[in-house]
Amino acid sequence: MTDALPALPEHHTVLRSFAGHLDAGPDAVFNRLVVAMAAGAAGGGNVYTDRDRRMVVLRRGWWYRGEYQVLPEDETGSLVQYEIVNVAQVAPWAGSWAAASVLRASPRAFQTLLTGLSHP
């Protein structure tokens, strides 16, 4: 895990976006997110963090970039945002094709992540 986010390539496509509210402060939620992403990356991938922006980027394979950001919402809550980005630089259409199973699983996976982040 590194503390510098890789630049988003010039050619990229956001394939899907999600957002969800949690009744916990953004710093606590961000810390839980970092732990969850590090555990998830154990199966392959690289995790990058930017604590100032409360942002985590997960890179896997040749096309996948998952961007997570935790923002303050209301007085005590947090908004967790997640984008699935196709960063394939050669044959980006193939990245979109390869993403099909990830996109199908993403609503449930994001809900599972939110549930996990809501418990300390």
Image (cartoon, rainbow, N blue to C red):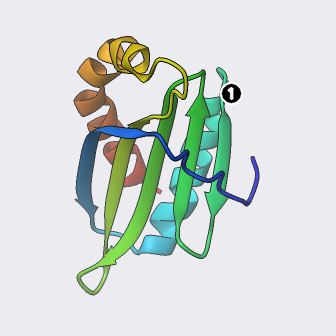
Q: Is residue 82 above or below residue 106?
A: below
Q: Name the residue rendered at 54%, 28% in the picture.
A: 89
Residue at the far right: name it: 2
- Residue 45 in the figure: left or right of residue 119: right
Q: Nearer the viewer, residue 44 or 120?
A: 44
Label 1 packing within 10 angstroms: few (<14), some (14-19), many (20+): few
Camera-nearest residue between 112 and 64? 64
Q: Position of residue 104 (x, y in %)?
A: 24, 19
Q: Quadrant of residue 107?
A: top left
Q: Is residue 40 visible?
A: no
The residue to which callout 1 is attached is 42
Question: Where residue 91 sits: x, y (%)?
Answer: 47, 17
The residue positioned 26% from the left and 45% from the top of the image is: 17
Asked if 4 appears above or below 64 in the picture, the reply is: below
Label 1 SS: loop
Is residue 112 found left or right of 85 in the rendered image? left
Please name the amino acid that badge 1 sits on.
Ala
Viewer-side residue, 12 vs 110: 12
Where in the figure is residue 101, as x and y percent of width and height? 33, 13
Task: Farthest residue to the bottom: give it.
Answer: 75
Residue 26 image point, x, y percent:
43, 72
Count of numbered marks: 1
Of 92 and 80, which appears nearest the observer?
Answer: 92
Side of 116 relative to 110 (left or right): right
Image point (53%, 72%), residue name: 53
Asked if residue 10 shows in the view, the reply is: yes
